[in-house]
Amino acid sequence: MRILGRDILDRKKIIPGLSDIFGIGNHTAFEIASLAGIDYQKRIKDLTEEDIAKINSVVERLGIKLEGDLRREISENIQRLKDIKCYRGLRHIAGLPVRGQRTHSNARTRKGPRKHKILARKKKKK
């Protein structure tokens, strides 16, 4: 079923289903469901068109940014940091951890796989 511009699996309950949408976590999903007056135990397939309209109106009223708009805002923020060349922007450019983590022995996720040094061995003369 399509809710807030995203296809959600019909067998999921309302809270995990709403949490699948980028920009909505568990707490916000509970808040949306309670403001829309929808039972938490309901499954996505059991929602009526009225329920979906209520969810859409609650999200509109709360002014929550979702999916594409939120992704665009995040990427614009990162690009702004890169453009002004602040410390965090330079870390993004270099592909290193941004929030103060150590890099001597960790940070393999940001730095990528190890680059092994090729040891040039001298061939022994016989």
Image: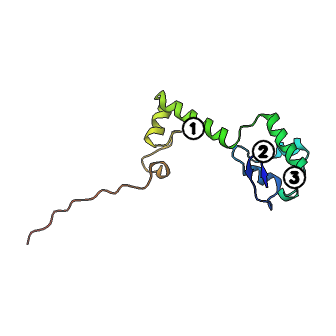
Nearer to us of marks 1 and 3 is 1
Please tell me whether residue 100 is drawn above or below residue 114 in the rendered image.
above
Q: Which residue is mark 2?
A: 27
Instruction: Name the spot of residue 117 as percent of width and height, x first.
Output: 30, 56
Q: Between disc 2 and disc 1, whose residue precedes?
A: 2
Q: Which residue is mark 3?
A: 40
Q: How is the image coloured?
A: rainbow
Q: Which residue is mark 1?
A: 75
Label 2 close to label 1 by CB (< 8 Å) = no
Label 3 close to label 2 by CB (< 8 Å) = no
Please tell me whether residue 103 is drawn above or below residue 43 in the rendered image.
above
Determine the secondary structure under disc 2.
helix
Cα separation between marks 2 and 1: 24 Å
Q: Between disc 3 and disc 2, whose residue precedes?
A: 2
Please tell me whether residue 94 is drawn above or below residue 85 in the rendered image.
below
121 horizontally vs 12: left or right = left
Determine the secondary structure under disc 3.
loop
Q: Hey, which residue is sitting farthest top in the picture?
A: 84
Instruction: Name the spot of residue 67 as percent of width and height, x first.
Output: 68, 44
Instruction: Name the spot of residue 57 as percent of width and height, x first.
Output: 84, 39
Instruction: Name the spot of residue 8 as percent of width and height, x first.
Output: 75, 55
Amino acid on which disc 1 is placed? Ser
Cα separation between marks 1 and 3: 33 Å
Residue 86 in view:
no
Q: Hey, which residue is sitting farthest left in the picture?
A: 126
Which residue is drawn at the image coordinates 16% and 62% (left, top)? 122
Q: Between disc 1 and disc 3, whose residue precedes?
A: 3
Image quarter (top left, top right, bottom left or bottom right) of the C terminus: bottom left
